[in-house]
Image (tube, grey):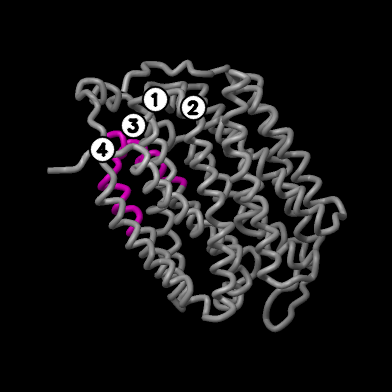
């Protein structure tokens, strides 16, 4: 006889998966950018392309992931996805061949694609509607907080062991996590008629929903500082800017994630207090634009850089409010599908921007090489960051047409 499923315990196990895959997306490329350049003889454009394979598979899995979670539930899919993420991670860090490393990065992205959508699925399946914003914010906190703690541990271990050994052990932890998910997560049974009717028309109810598109575009553009800077080019930029080692630069870069972790519940609570999603979308976007521009273009001492990156992380939690608004725009039985769609668009920024910034850096590079590796200047990086600022300005165009959705969930039955 199965023991009774506890909603908070189930949510906790899936959030651990979200945290685990978050590290594979953020900490791995930020710590290994220069190592990968040396290993595969790549320039900035080449390593940006290799890392972006994760985003490519992650992004285009989001629509099928949302549908599959709505159709088959969370338990089996999250268990298999965690294991696949771990296998891909092991292949990526252990292979001496570019082709196999790329395959590993793709597999990691496919598995990781289930994580965030699965947390939202558990939230809408097992918790009341008024908890949605808070739990989405807490999920973002754990996901963003993971790279801060785990990244520092991994960075320290790399100083003692080889980076391949450290990340292979981390990959092994994924298999243990998949075991825990299988034994602790349960699926909520929706009324058969409700879910069967809704799943016949997911594209009509989600992809043809104007508000879902606007919120998805907003999220994609707002997320640019994370996908392009923090996830990829931030550490090497800070290392060059302050003439510090990889560990110190990685720590400063993770301040942005600390801001995300600290600010997510705050933004969610503020949205509930104001009884408005739209006001927080404006605050998040404007705050992100100002603080990111200050961090990347102003001649800041290290202490002020820490403050600026923290504020970028806090304000970028406008994406949490956008996800909440999207969930409030469709029936709860379509929570997986709408979450997958918005998350797909969000991650599309990484698919485009990581290689794009690498190409910009390579284009403006003066050709200097040292020990077989390209040497890029501070201005090379800063010129590429203009693309991120342009994304944030474009996001402003979506806001006037977004409608207020505060607790207006359509078809709220669970």
**Which type of secondary structure does the marked residue at label 1 adopt?**
loop
Magenta residue check for 409 = no
Separation of disc 1 and disc 3 at Cα?
A: 7 Å
Q: Label 2, on which residue?
A: 326
First of labels 3, 2 by sequence position: 3
Separation of disc 4 and disc 3 at Cα?
A: 9 Å
Separation of disc 3 and disc 2 at Cα?
A: 18 Å
For marks 3 and 2, give the one nearer the viewer: 3
Residue drawn at the location 32% of the way across and 59% of the way down? 83
First of labels 1, 4 by sequence position: 1
The answer to whether the residues at label 1 and label 3 have Cβ atoms under 8 Å apart is no
x then y, percent, for residue 387: 71, 47
Residue drawn at the location 78% of the way across and 52% of the way down? 296
The stretch of residues the image draws in magenta is 59-83
Q: Label 3, on which residue?
A: 126
**Which type of secondary structure does the marked residue at label 3 adopt?**
helix
Q: Which residue sits furthest bottom?
A: 371
The answer to whether the residues at label 4 and label 2 have Cβ atoms under 8 Å apart is no
Position of the C terminus, as image quadrant, is top left
Residue 44 placement: quadrant: bottom right
Q: Label 4, on which residue?
A: 187
Closest to the observer, 138 or 278:
138
Q: Which residue sits furthest right?
A: 299
Separation of disc 4 and disc 2 at Cα?
A: 22 Å
Residue 299 placement: quadrant: bottom right
The 10 Å Cα crowd at callout 1, few under 14, some 14 to 19, many 20 or more, is few
Q: Label 1, on which residue?
A: 128
């Amino acid at each position: 006889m199965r023991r009774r499923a506890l909603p908070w315990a189930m949510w906790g196990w899936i959030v651990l998966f979200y945290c685990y895959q978050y590290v594979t997306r953020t900490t791995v490329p930020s710590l290994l950018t220069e190592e990968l350049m040396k290993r595969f003889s790549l320039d900035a454009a080449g390593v940006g392309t290799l890392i972006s394979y994760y985003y490519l598979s992650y992004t285009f899995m989001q629509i099928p992931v949302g549908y599959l979670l709505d159709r088959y539930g969370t338990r089996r899919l999250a268990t298999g996805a965690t294991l696949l993420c771990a296998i891909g991670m092991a292949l990526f860090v252990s292979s001496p061949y570019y082709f196999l490393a790329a395959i590993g990065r793709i597999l990691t992205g496919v598995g990781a694609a289930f994580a965030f959508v699965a947390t939202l699925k558990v939230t809408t399946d097992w918790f009341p509607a008024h908890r949605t914003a808070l739990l989405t914010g807490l999920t973002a906190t754990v996901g963003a907080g993971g790279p801060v703690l785990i990244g520092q541990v991994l960075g320290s271990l790399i100083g003692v062991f080889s980076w391949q050994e450290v990340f292979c052990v981390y990959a092994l932890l994924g298999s243990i996590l998949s075991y825990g998910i299988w034994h602790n997560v349960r699926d909520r049974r929706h009324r058969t008629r409700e879910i069967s009717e809704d799943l016949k028309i997911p594209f009509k109810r989600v992809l043809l929903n104007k508000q879902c598109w606007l919120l998805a575009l907003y999220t994609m553009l707002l997320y640019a500082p994370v996908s392009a800077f923090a996830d990829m080019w931030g550490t090497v930029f800070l290392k060059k800017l302050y003439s510090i080692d990889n560990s110190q630069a990685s720590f400063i870069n993770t301040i942005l994630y600390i801001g995300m972790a600290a600010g997510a519940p705050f933004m969610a609570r503020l949205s509930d207090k104001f009884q408005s999603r739209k006001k927080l979308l404006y605050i998040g976007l404007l705050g992100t634009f100002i603080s990111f521009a200050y961090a990347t273009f102003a001649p800041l001492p290290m202490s002020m850089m820490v403050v600026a990156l923290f504020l970028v992380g806090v304000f970028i939690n406008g994406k949490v409010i956008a996800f909440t608004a999207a969930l409030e725009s469709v029936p709860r039985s379509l929570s997986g599908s709408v979450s997958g769609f918005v998350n797909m668009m969000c991650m599309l920024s990484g698919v485009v921007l990581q290689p794009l910034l690498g190409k910009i850096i390579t284009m403006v590079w003066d050709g200097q090489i040292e020990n077989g590796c390209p040497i890029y200047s501070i201005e090379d990086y800063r010129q590429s960051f203009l693309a991120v600022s342009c994304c944030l300005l474009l996001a402003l165009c979506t806001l006037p047409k977004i409608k207020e959705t505060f607790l207006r969930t359509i078809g709220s039955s669970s």
